[in-house]
């Protein structure tokens, strides 16, 4: 039985991840942490019926981890909170699955330092869907043959998303840039902005769009668009729970979802 703690338990992703944990007889939700609904039963917050797991205050994560002793913590919160949660969990030798996006390079480095110093294992990915992980591989392949084409990334998400551009779009840009030996990234354009050899990144926000990503390779007389569309958050939640099972038998280190799926891109 794998014991799981969830931070951001009352959020859109947290709720769906808990539903997926409850569906498996091999997994047990032992701790639900958030900064809202503290003291309420998480099942009642999710309107699925009482689960006898109370929402605990994420500001007291150390005590909650000591009491519940999870094997793995799954974090889908916001960047500032995730950094604290990851450091606290790593200090308690709890494995990690981190889906939160919007980290600065400094925040990423802080988390990786805590993970490595404590010898724990973690999967950190801005997108846990199988499709997006295949999509990133397709982009690297396309970029190899279309290195002189203009490359633009357009992403669209719901109107509640806090960070922009999406972690998935940033990772898409990083994959292409790495393939092409380094490219400048330009975030949106306004006023005089002649196009150079950059990758343009554009974020659209509206309604309840779950997550669309299009990468445009445009040349003389033609263009290719490689597109991924998420229809439901279930694709991310299922992937995160799969990663939680996988990380429990992984060696210490920082992994990507591609490692979990066995589709790791070799340089
Ligand atoms: N990696 C992926 O596959 C993937 C997929 C979807 C969303 N995301 C990312 O996951 C994150 C959450 O997305 P969401 O749509 O569920 O957001 P949400 O706003 O619905 O939920 C976030 C939850 O975190 C809680 N929270 C805030 N501070 C906290 C703290 N200190 N400790 C614990 N909980 C805290 C909030 O109260 C809220 O319940 C975002 O960064 C989003 O971009 C990643």
Image (cartoon, rainbow, N blue to C red):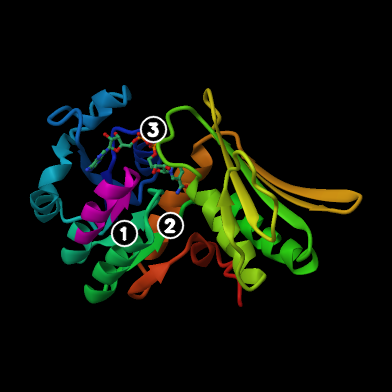
Q: How many marks?
A: 3
**Foreground of the two, 49 or 184:** 184
Check disc 1 and report the residue beneath it. 107
Q: Within 10 angstroms of label 1, few (less than 14), some, or many (20 or more) residues? A: some
| Ligand 1 closer than 8 Å to label 3 CB | yes
Quadrant of the frame with the C terminus: bottom right
Instruction: Tell me how far mark 2 sits from mark 3, CA to CA.
Output: 18 Å
Q: Quadrant of residue 137?
A: bottom right
How far apart in space, not on screen, are marks 3 and 1 (Cα)? 23 Å
Residue at position x 57%, y 57% in the image: 185
Is 5 or 36 nearer to us in this picture? 36
Task: Dividing the image into four quarters, tell me where ligand 1 lies.
Answer: top left
Does residue 151 appear in the picture of this structure? yes
Please name the residue shown 26% across and 28% down the image.
43
| Percent coordinates x, y for residue 259 in the rendering | 50, 67
Locate residue 31 relative to residue 13 in the image: left or right.
left
Q: Which residue is mark 3?
A: 12
Sooner in the amino-acid sequence: mark 3 or mark 1: 3
Q: Are marks 1 and 2 in contact (CB under 8 Å)?
A: no
Q: Is residue 232 above or below residue 143?
A: above
Say which of marks 2 and 3 sits in front.
Answer: 3
Q: Which residue is mark 2?
A: 243
Instruction: In the rendered view, tell whether residue 125 sits above or below residue 43.
Output: below
């Amino acid at each position: 039985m794998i014991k799981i703690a969830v931070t951001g338990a009352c959020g859109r992703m947290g709720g769906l991840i808990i539903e997926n944990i409850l569906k498996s007889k091999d997994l047990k939700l032992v701790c639900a942490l958030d900064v809202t609904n503290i003291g309420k039963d998480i099942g009642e917050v999710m309107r699925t019926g009482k689960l006898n797991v109370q929402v605990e205050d994420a500001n007291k994560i150390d005590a909650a981890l000591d009491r519940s002793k999870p094997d793995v913590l799954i974090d889908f919160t916001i960047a500032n909170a995730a950094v604290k949660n990851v450091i606290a969990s790593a200090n308690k030798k709890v494995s990690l699955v981190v889906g939160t996006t919007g980290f600065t390079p400094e925040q990423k480095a802080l988390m990786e330092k805590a993970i490595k110093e404590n010898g724990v294992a973690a999967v950190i990915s801005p997108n846990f869907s199988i499709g997006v992980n295949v999509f990133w591989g397709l982009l690297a392949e396309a970029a190899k043959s279309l290195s002189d084409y203009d490359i633009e990334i357009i992403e669209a998400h719901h109107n509640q998303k806090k960070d922009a551009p999406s972690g998935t779009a940033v990772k898409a840009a990083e994959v292409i840039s790495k393939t092409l030996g380094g490219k400048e990234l330009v975030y949106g354009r306004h006023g005089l902005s002649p196009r150079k050899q950059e990758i343009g990144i554009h974020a659209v926000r509206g309604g309840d769009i779950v997550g669309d990503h299009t990468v445009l390779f445009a040349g003389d007389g033609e263009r290719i668009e490689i597109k991924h569309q998420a229809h439901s958050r279930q694709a991310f939640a299922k992937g995160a729970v799969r990663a939680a099972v996988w990380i429990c038998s992984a060696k210490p280190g920082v992994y990507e979802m591609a490692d979990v799926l066995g589709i790791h891109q070799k340089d």
